[in-house]
Amino acid sequence: MMKRAYAALAAMICLLFATGSYADQPRPWETGMQQAATGNMHQIRWFEAYTLWFIIPITLLVLVLLVVVMVKFRASKNPVPSKTSHNTLVEVIWTIGPVLILLFLAIPSFNLLTDQLTFPEKTDVTVKATATQWQWNYEYEGSGAAPLAFDSFMLKEQDRAAAGKDDKSKYPRLLAVDNEMVVPVGKNVRLLITAAPTDVIHSFALPAFGVRIDAIPGRLNETWFNADREGLYYGQCSELCGKDHSFMPIAIRVVSDDQYKQWLAAAATDVGKANKALMAAVDQPTTVKVAENTAK
């Protein structure tokens, strides 16, 4: 009986944490950044933790100094205020101290910016994202004689069943879209970002990838990422672009290289069917096999 109980408990735990694909999205009461899914985002998370080693002591020091000033130099304690206006040691400290702190922050900051702005020598996939009020259009360069292109709208609640996206834990309200951008895992993806010529400024932002870049009419900005694990990742337009600004989500599905090639070939004729076939492959739940208890 005990062995059966342990086996059942193990199966429940496995089922609880089993998932067909990873999905990163905002979560209730989340106070930190989303989990990193690219090398650049790993560096961003590290730099955030690194800066806290400076921010917290500085904040505590300022708090202590304020308390000391309020207590030691209050009017009842010092009816005759000091007329001291200069102190060489204090002035040297408050000049050299901030310079050293900024130096320690500048070096890793510049390294991070360099890594973000330095494109890899080899680009595996190039996608052009064009923003309009209020949707995204994705165009895959070099995907054939007629480049693959499709629109990505926020998924409406009444369309969930038809799209096969009833599970709000994977396809959350106001973040899920009808057609996700699909990219292969472990590949260098180059993003060309712009906005329609007659539109306004938008911003392509995906927190888990450490990507945020403006989409400006008449201008082509570019960035890159290399996703280190499969899954479905969500972002949003991060520029106030009009009344439906909050209804302009971004969804990127990262899949294996073989799944990506199959999707790309199928999407050339029918994007909707290609997406459903891909969903059927990656959204199926992981099965858990429990060894039979042969003890009688």
Image: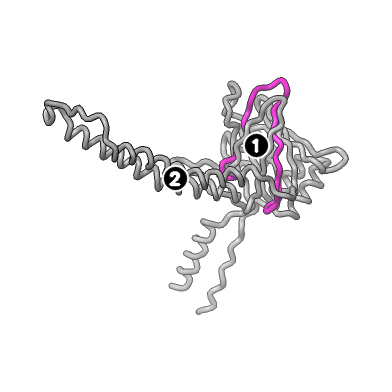
Front residue of 269/116: it is 116
Identify which residue is drawn at 46% across, 44% down. Answer: 103
Task: Answer whether residue 158 is visible to the viewer in this image.
Answer: no
Question: Mark 1 highlights which residue?
Answer: 177
SS at circle 2: helix
Q: Amino acid at mark 1?
A: Val
Residue 191 percent coordinates (x, y): 70, 40
Question: Mark 2 highlights which residue?
Answer: 51
Quarter of the image with the N terminus in it: bottom left
Callouts 2 and 1 close, C-beta under 8 Å: no
Residue 164 percent coordinates (x, y): 66, 42
**If you read the primary sequence from the N terminus, does the residue marked by circle 2 or circle 1 appear first?**
2
Compared with 168, 15 (above or below) is below
Compared with 17, 74 (above or below) is above
Q: Kindly identify which numbered label has been placed on residue 262.
A: none
Q: Is residue 152 magenta?
A: no
State which mark lies toward you, 2 or 1: 2
- Answer left or right for 7 relative to 205: left
Q: Amino acid at mark 2?
A: Thr
Query: On the image, which quarter does residue 5 sit in?
Result: bottom left
Region in magenta: 182-209
Front residue of 109/144: it is 109
Query: On the image, which quarter does residue 51 sit in?
Result: top left
- Answer left or right for 99 relative to 225: left
Residue 40 percent coordinates (x, y): 59, 47
Front residue of 143/59: it is 59
Q: CA distance from mark 2 to mark 1?
A: 35 Å
Task: Answer whether residue 245 is visible to the viewer in this image.
Answer: yes
Binning the other alpha carbons within 10 Å of mark 1 as few (below 14), some (14 to 19) or many (20 upward) gives: many
- Answer left or right for 4 relative to 261: left
